[in-house]
Amino acid sequence: MEKTNLCVKCINWDHRPEGNPGELMGYCIARKKNVGPHYQCDLFQLKTPEITALMNRRIYGAYNEENGEDFDF
Ligand code: SF4
């Protein structure tokens, strides 16, 4: 059975391509350090559109996309 890199599917993955980390390296928000690919991880949480939106709201506050002006910090 082929191993799957969980990090690229995880809400905790922050690839930060501007740092030129390479295809498989990135920053793990949960572990607070750069990590290589994990094929098993107790902290894995599947990145879904709903969880991504929730994370963005926590980080950036509410944003009304209809008029692009209403921030709620
Ligand atoms: S929590 Fe685990 S699977 Fe998710 S990015 Fe960090 S190391 Fe990878």
Image (cartoon, rainbow, N blue to C red):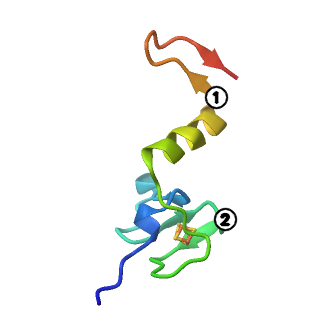
Determine whether the beta carbon of the residue marked 1 sits less than 8 angstroms from the nearest atom of ligand 1.
no
Q: Position of residue 66 (x, y in %)?
A: 43, 13
State the quadrant of the N terminus. bottom left
Q: Amino acid at mark 1?
A: Gly
Rendered residue at 57%/12% (across/down): 70
Task: Tell which of 24 and 64 is nearer to you.
Answer: 64
Q: Residues within 10 Å of mark 1 (few under 14, many from 20)?
A: few
Q: Which mark is residue 61?
A: 1
Question: Which of the two discs, 2 and 1, sits closer to the camera?
Answer: 1
Residue 43's quadrant in the figure?
A: bottom right
Q: Amino acid at mark 2?
A: Lys
Marks 1 and 2: in contact by CB < 8 Å? no
Q: Residue furthest right?
A: 73
- Count the labels in the image: 2
- Quadrant containing ligand 1 reads bottom right
| Image location (x, y in percent) of residue 13 | 51, 60
Percent x, y for residue 8? 41, 64
Q: Quadrant of residue 63?
A: top right
**At x 42% / y 62%, what residue is drawn?**
9
Give residue 26's position: percent from left, percent from top. Answer: 48, 65
Query: Is tag 2's residue or tag 1's residue first in the polypeptide sequence?
Result: 2
Q: Is residue 56 left or right of residue 9?
A: right
SS category of the residue bearing label 1: loop
Helix, strand or loop under label 2: loop
* Residue at the disc numbered 2: 32
Look at the picture and state if 31 lies above or below 13.
below
Q: Is residue 4 left or right of residue 63?
A: left
Determine the residue positioned at 48% across, 62% down: 10
- Alpha carbon of mark 2 to alpha carbon of mark 1: how far? 22 Å
* Structural crowding at the residue carrying mark 2, measured as other residues with C-alpha within 10 Å and reported as few (<14), some (14–19) or many (≥20): few
